[in-house]
Amino acid sequence: MVYVPAEASDDSTAKVIYTSKDRKSRKTFNALDWLARLVTHIPGRYEQTVRYYGYYSNKSRGMRKKAGRDDSIPAVMPKEMASKESRQPTTGTDFLSVLRGFR
């Protein structure tokens, strides 16, 4: 991308010359038109733009599947703590028991 100021252009309007990544195509925009197109890529407030990135991206999952390592899922808790029994509340520590203790 190259910015051409109004003083340097032949028709005295500011321009932006955009070249694609593969360098096969090139477009020339009026500077304000280019800015208007660029602003359309800014996400709205509270808008989620990236859903899967890093470990959960399609590329990463495909590479793991191809290598035969897709069966392992990352976990925050160790396996011995992830059992159903460890998630059950012990007697007297559930939410209602705690609230009853404030009476």
Image (cartoon, grey):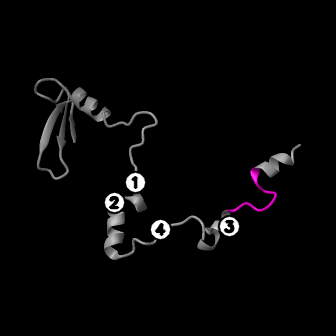
- Apparent side of residue 99 relative to residue 8 in the rendered image (left or right): right
In front here: 22 or 44? 44
Q: In the rendering, which numbered label is found on residue 66?
A: none
Is label 3 or label 4 in front? 3
In front here: 34 or 73? 73
SS at badge 4: loop
What's the distance in space between the residues labelled 2 and 4, CA to CA? 15 Å
Q: Alpha-carbon neighbours of circle 3 within 10 Å: few (<14), some, or many (≥20)?
A: few
SS at badge 2: helix
- Residue drawn at x 21%, y 40% as measured from the top left: 2
Q: In the rendering, which numbered label is found on residue 52?
A: 1
In this picture, is 39 found above or below 26? above
Which residue of the protein is positioned furthest toward the bottom in this rendering?
68
What's the distance in space between the residues labelled 3 and 4, CA to CA? 20 Å
Proximity of marks 1 and 2: CB atoms separated by less than 8 Å: yes
SS at badge 3: helix
Q: In the rendering, which numbered label is found on residue 73?
A: 4
Q: Which residues are magenta?
A: 88-95
Residue that carries the numbered disc 3 in the rendered image: 86
Q: Quadrant of residue 33?
A: top left
Where does the image place residue 86, in percent across and percent down from the top left? 68, 67
Where does the image place residue 69, in percent across and percent down from the top left? 39, 74
Residue that carries the numbered disc 2 in the rendered image: 58
Q: Main secondary structure of the magenta part?
A: loop
Comes first in the chain, label 1 or label 2: 1
Which quadrant of the rendered structure holds the N terminus?
Answer: top left
Comes first in the chain, label 3 or label 4: 4
